[in-house]
Image: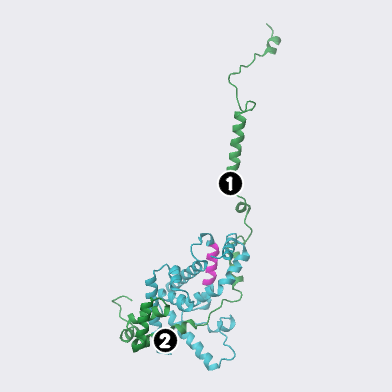
Chain colours: A green, B cyan
């Protein structure tokens, strides 16, 4: 609530009733969020001060009401309902076995294949008998046969 | 995080439907209880709880295991609830006061009183629950979150800080204020 907005009747009563700081301390006490020293101090206040005692009793009661609320259970067909919704929305693909693309790492295979091709290419190129190696120094022999065939 | 939880997460990431069902079975009641107490309406709560699990499935890859899985799950739950409350408020369709009394009997919302409880006591209990739910629904959204997580779900302040992303002091002060309001409202009726 902002400072400008008028307090609701119940909230206005709160302010006249128990100090919010006391509620805060007792609340922390009930949550086990206080140090040993603070805890002892709050216990002392609860024991000797009626306002603190009342705050403690009322907050304990409120918490008991809340924690005593019956647990709501999901309907028995809830799980099936969720599964069906997923099947429907994904047109049956969501729970299907993963596609080939999901299961086979095509990207990694491509890298391996490229590396393999490079290695093979290098071997062929560097080999003296490799077909990829071009011997530029070698002279081409004259076509002997043609000289014999052509008329002078 | 336990080894069992890690295995389950691995299976979830691999889109193993059985793992998803296992996860829902383990957490559905708690998630549903939070959505129900936050929204105060069973139908809305069920729909939001469903969306929570669907979101978890869709975004499980983004869970980095830096927190407990339950903390992450409750964060998703709280965010969905807050969004739904805003959505309902925008549509002027906020119907949080409704307590689906029939749901206790038909849908097993733990609403069937034990046989040994006398009818007048059972009625008293049901009325108290209606009053409490009304009181919770009347809280500001941020106060409602901390009260539901702390006083109904019994989570620790630390865990609530992790779920909401709020500092310790803010969580405590919201809790104090919420309890103050609840105490006053309950006093008027009980």
Name the quarter where the C terminus of chain B is drawn: bottom left
Disc 1 marks which residue? A108
Residue, x 59% and y 65% (percent of image)?
Answer: B4
Classify A101 as above or below A37.
Answer: above
* Closer-to-camera residue (B57/B91): B57
Examine the rendering and report whether any part of residue B91 can be seen: no
Examine the rendering and report whether any part of residue A53 can be seen: yes
Q: Residue furthest top?
A: A152
Residue A66 located left or right of residue A151: left
What element does badge 2 sit on? helix
What element does badge 1 sit on? helix
Q: Quadrant of residue A122?
A: top right
x and y percentages locating residue A83 in the rendered image: 60, 67
Residue B24 located left or right of residue B146: right
Residue A85 located left or right of residue B177: right
Q: Chain of mark 2?
A: B
Residue, x 52% and y 92% (percent of image)?
Answer: B121
For the magenta stretch, what is the residue range?
Answer: B48-58
Cα separation, mark 2 vs mark 1, equals: 65 Å
Disc 2 marks which residue? B186
Classify A92 as above or below B186.
Answer: above
Is A124 magenta? The answer is no
Q: Residues within 10 Å of mark 2 (few under 14, many from 20)?
A: some
Whether tag 2 and tag 1 are in contact, CB under 8 A, the answer is no
């Amino acid at each position: 609530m902002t400072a400008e907005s008028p307090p609701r009747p119940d909230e206005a009563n709160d302010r006249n009733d128990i100090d919010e700081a006391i509620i805060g301390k007792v609340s922390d006490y009930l949550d086990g969020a206080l140090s040993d020293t603070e805890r002892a101090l709050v216990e002392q206040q609860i024991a000797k001060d009626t306002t603190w005692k009342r705050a403690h009793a009322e907050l304990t009661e409120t918490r008991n009401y809340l924690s005593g609320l019956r647990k709501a259970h999901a309907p028995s067909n809830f799980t099936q309902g969720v599964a069906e919704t997923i099947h429907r929305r994904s047109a049956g693909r969501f729970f299907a076995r993963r596609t080939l693309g999901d299961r086979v790492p095509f990207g990694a295979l491509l890298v391996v294949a490229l590396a393999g091709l490079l290695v093979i290419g290098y071997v062929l190129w560097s080999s003296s008998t490799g077909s990829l190696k071009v011997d530029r120094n070698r002279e081409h022999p004259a076509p002997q046969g043609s000289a014999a065939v052509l008329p002078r | 995080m336990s080894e069992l939880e890690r295995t389950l997460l691995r299976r979830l990431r691999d889109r193993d439907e059985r793992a998803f069902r296992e996860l829902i079975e383990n957490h559905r009641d708690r998630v549903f209880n939070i959505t129900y107490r936050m929204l105060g309406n069973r139908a809305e709560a069920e729909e939001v709880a469903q969306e929570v699990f669907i979101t978890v499935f869709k975004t499980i890859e983004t869970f980095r295991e830096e927190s407990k899985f339950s903390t992450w799950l409750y964060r998703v739950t709280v965010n969905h609830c807050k969004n739904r409350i805003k959505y309902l408020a925008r549509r002027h369709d906020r119907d949080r006061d409704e307590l689906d009394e029939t749901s206790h009997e038909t849908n097993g919302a733990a609403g069937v009183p034990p046989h040994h409880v006398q009818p007048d006591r059972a009625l008293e209990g049901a009325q108290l629950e209606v009053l409490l739910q009304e009181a919770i629904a009347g809280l500001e959204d941020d106060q409602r979150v901390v009260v539901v997580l702390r006083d109904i779900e019994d989570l620790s302040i630390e865990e609530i800080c992790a779920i909401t992303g709020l500092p310790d002091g803010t969580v405590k002060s919201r809790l104090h204020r919420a309890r103050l309001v609840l105490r006053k409202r309950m006093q008027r009726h009980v």
